[in-house]
Every structure is written in structure tokens, then in C-alpha cells.
Amino acid sequence: MYFTFAFDNYDGAKKNLLMLKNLGYKLYIDDFGSGYSNFIYLTEIKTDFIKIDGNIIRKILDDKVSYLVVKNIVNFAKEANIKVIAEFVSDEKIYEKVKELKIEYSQGFYFSKPEENL
């Protein structure tokens, strides 16, 4: 099941997410590294997966800062026992870099274009 939360009421959302986690649900943070997704959620909600924002992933070959951001997110996640997903893996070169960084999961056009019907 997939839920999206806007954290207008962070304390209430946090309480509900922790309740779901206690019921056995896995928690994911999508677009990590942009917008409202930040490290405080990892410390308070104990998420199971983070999906690194595609705008960062797509630049890891050409932009040193993007590469370092991804590398440090992955290192932190490994230490915290959080699985990592890379978004926007659009070609083999990016996929090879993602594997080199030991990111567990990838998604993007390199694997498949979005389909209306599966």
C-alpha cells in the first residue's frame, strides 16, 4: 500500500506513521534530498527505505557535489540499516555508478519506460 503525506501536521503524521510501522508496514521516503524530505524524518520515523531524488541521481556522473551528496546519503543509510533506491537511472553509465555506490535498488528509463497498463 502506498500513502503520501504532506507534513502540515508533523506531530500527527509522525504518530500515525509510527503506528503503521508498529503494525508491520514498511516506510519509504520518496524524493529524498529535495523538498520536505530530510534527515530529521530518518531519526524520528525510522524509515525502512529512502528513494534518492532523481534530480540528484541524474547528475552523479558530471557534478562532483551531486556525487558526494549521493555517496554520503548511501553511507549514512547503510550505517542506519536503511535500504536505498536510486530514481531516474536513465542509462548504463548511471546504473554502473549507482552499483559502484552500492545502492540496492534502481528505477528509471534504463530498465523500462512508464507503462499505462502493466
Image (cartoon, rainbow, N blue to C red):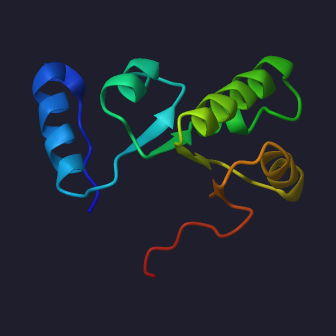
Up the image or down, 108 lies above or below 35; here it is: below
Specify the quadrant that holds the N terminus. bottom left
Q: Nearer the viewer, residue 21 or 63?
A: 21
Q: Position of residue 87 (x, y in %)?
A: 61, 47
- Answer left or right for 118 relative to 75: left
- Answer left or right for 52 relative to 92: left
Residue 73 placement: quadrant: top right
Total marks shown come to: 0
Q: Position of residue 3 (x, y in %)?
A: 25, 50
- Answer left or right for 27 relative to 95: left
The residue positioned farthest toward the bottom in the image shown: 118
Q: Position of residue 63 (x, y in %)?
A: 84, 23
Up the image or down, 86 lies above or below 64; here it is: below
Q: Position of residue 118 (x, y in %)?
A: 45, 82
Residue 69 placement: quadrant: top right
Residue lying at 89% horizontally and 29% vertically, measured from the top left? 62
Up the image or down, 17 lies above or below 106; here it is: above
- Answer left or right for 113 relative to 81: right
Residue lying at 19% horizontally and 29% vertically, measured from the top left? 14
Residue lying at 17% horizontally and 55% vertically, measured from the top left? 23
Residue 71 placement: quadrant: top right
